[in-house]
Image (cartoon, rainbow, N blue to C red):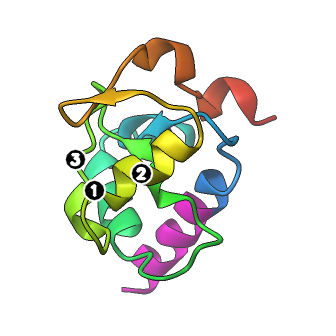
Amino acid sequence: MKNNDNFFEKVYDVARKIPYGRVTSYGAIAKFLGAAKSARMVGWAMNSVGGDHSIPAHRVVNRNGVLTGKHHFSGINLMQQLLENEGIQIKDDKIIHFETVFWNPSKNIG
């Protein structure tokens, strides 16, 4: 379990760097961390955030821009509301113009 805790902290460090009004994917974070096949683990880390508002888990979506983690947020459509508050357009649980708002940690973190 110690290794998971360390991996989760690395995931959280990357998530905290996602700029306001941008999103990234579970897989992009996993690839940045050198664990390309660990997108699911990144998802588990995001699901474990709970009430820690310093980690913008709402900005992490699946590779197609679908809000797959939305059921882990309290309230009705909270994940969508948080993204829309940042100017991101969503239709049918999917980000419109996903490629425009996508933030790639491998290209943006030195």
| Circles 2 and 3 in contact, beta carbons < 8 Å | no
Q: Which amino acid does label 3 sit on?
A: Thr
Question: Can you see residue 34?
Answer: no
Q: Which of marks 1 and 3 is in front?
A: 1
Q: Is most of the magenta stretch helix, strand or loop?
A: helix
Which one is nearer the viewer's eye here, 51 or 27? Answer: 51
From the viewer's perspective, is residue 95 above or below residue 23? above
Q: How far apart are marks 1 and 3 (CA)?
A: 12 Å
Residue 89: give x, y in percent of width and height.
42, 27
| Circles 2 and 1 in contact, beta carbons < 8 Å | yes
Is residue 67 rendered to the left or right of residue 50?
Answer: left
From the viewer's perspective, is residue 13 above or below residue 66? below
Q: Which mark is residue 68?
A: 3
Question: Can you see residue 71?
Answer: yes
Q: Which residue is drawn at 24% across and 64% down?
A: 76
Q: Mark 1 points at which residue?
A: 77
Q: How far apart are marks 2 and 1 (CA)?
A: 6 Å
Q: Mark 2 points at which residue?
A: 81
Q: Distance between the residues labelled 2 and 3?
A: 14 Å
Residue 39: give x, y in percent of width and height.
32, 46
Dot 2 falls on a residue whose secondary structure is helix
Is residue 80 rendered to the left or right of residue 15?
Answer: left
- Does the segment drawn in magenta span residue 44? no
Which one is nearer the viewer's eye here, 37 or 78? Answer: 78
For the residue carrying disc 2, how many other residues have a C-alpha within 10 Å: few (<14), some (14-19), or many (20+)?
some
Q: Residue at x 48, y 82 (%)?
A: 51
Dot 1 falls on a residue whose secondary structure is loop
Residue 94: give x, y in percent of width and height.
26, 30
| For marks 2 and 3 on the same chain, the one whose residue lies earlier in the sequence | 3
Is residue 105 rendered to the left or right of residue 74?
Answer: right
Q: Which residues lie in the magenta part?
A: 1-12
Q: Which amino acid does label 2 sit on?
A: Gln
